[in-house]
Image (cartoon, rainbow, N blue to C red):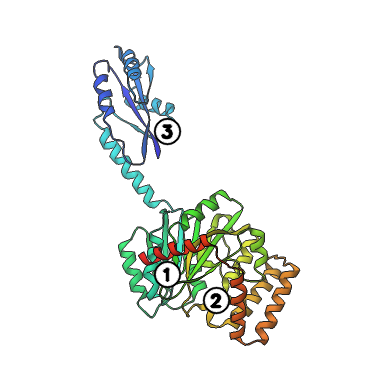
Amino acid sequence: MKNLSIIIPIYRGEKTLKDTFASLEKVKIGRGLKLAQIIFVDDGSPDRTFETLSNLSGESSLPVSFVSYKNKLGHKKAGAVGLKYSTSKLNIIVKSDLSDLDTKLSRLQKRLEKEKENRPPTLSVVMPVYNAAPFLKQSINSILKQTFKDFEFIIIDDASTDNSWEIVQKFAKKYPNKIRAFQNERNVKQAKTVNRAIKMARGDFIARMDADDVSLPNRFEKQIEYLRTHPKTVAVGAQCLIIDAKGKITGEKKFPTAFDDVYSYIFKFCPAQQPTFMIARKRLPHNLEYYDHDLSPVEDVEFLFKLFKYGRVENLPDYLLLYRIHGNNSSLKNYRRSFFLTLLSRVRGVVFHEYKPSPVGIAYTLAQTVAVSLLPQELNTKIYKFIKEEAEKSTSQERSYRRLAYQFSKSL
């Protein structure tokens, strides 16, 4: 809501002021505006204009103030005097008979609407898409139904071979003021696609999203509030519920919440799920390279090491994402390759990003390296799932939340 002052230079208004006040009582200012002041400038009137103003302002509920000059200034100079006394950023100077008031209010409203259209959004949501047609509509709808509305939605199709791009185009046509849709000329993979989207982003905050997942409706609202009230935090994630290809909840992914725990956890498992991430971009260097394509599909691990240099990385305790596991997830296709890229990321974190691992973290990494190198992948997967599940026991309250989340996902 923006404050507005109406400035009215007046000359010989003794007989007309009563009608002027009556008209002002009926004025509709418009959306997003609050009438803060009505400033009358008595332009050297020789009649009883000053006394009439004094009497009428005392009887009126309008926010009236007035200035009186002994000598006539003229409409333009009298209006300039009124501006000096105004406490509002928005001001309009109108004729004493108010004949131009509606026109000037209309022009002001159009200018404000144009400024709003050109104003950068608070949040930019970036979504890479590649052959995600079966899940894409649900994923996009989950963003459009967020309780926090001040965002732009940047979707880049990475040269899909299914009908993903057609789906994206239909949504972009339906929501032209919300969705910005692009397509890569050739498939460049997720890291480069996300980096391209981030370069296009205009918001102070950036939210990651994947084309096969579902964001719960209060995700952005909670994360924006957290980042605004925690200025030392550069990024915040959240907890996830796991869904299968049909959208059925099959489990959960829980992550540490406090920064110290996130910091140490990265030498055990990845301490955050990228599609839950929201980043406060202005707290990071302008030229930061977010994701390294050569580390795909675990490029998010080294990205976390980069973030640790500039501030705190935390996770909300809330479940804010339905994370879909359907057999085609990139990190699941080659478990052994993914692990060794993760190991490389940890080494780079120490060498290039000033990370200081604990003795326990080093021992855990060495044990993982031996197990992955010597044991069959199937056995490694079972051990990994067992350890994770033991750390992710659900309470009855969490199970209740799971049911609500599932109901929301089915409504999309």
Q: Percent from the top left, x then y, of residue 46?
A: 30, 12
Name the amino acid type tagged 3.
Answer: Ser
Foreground of the two, 282 or 387: 387
Relative to residue 245, is residue 263 depicted above or below?
Answer: above
Q: In this view, does 359 lie to the left or right of 135?
A: right
**Hey, which quadrant is residue 88 in on the image?**
top left
The amino acid pointed to by label 2 is Pro
Q: How crowded is mark 3: few (under 14 residues within 10 Å), some or many (20 or more)?
A: some
Q: Position of residue 162 (x, y in %)?
A: 37, 79
The mark closer to the camera, 2 or 1, is: 2
Circle nearer the N terminus (3, 2): 3
Is 287 on the left or on the right of 356, as rendered? Answer: left
Q: Which of marks 3 and 2 is in front?
A: 2
Callout 1, which amino acid?
A: Ile
Q: Name the residue under label 2.
A: 297
Badge 1 density bin: few <14, some 14–19, many ≥20, Cα 10 Å: many
Q: Quadrant of the N terminus?
A: top left
- Residue at which label 1 appears: 156
As drawn, the label of residue 88 is 3
Image coords of residue 137 (percent x, y): 36, 69
Up/down of 380 relative to 150, above or below: below
Up the image or down, 183 lies above or below 336; here it is: above
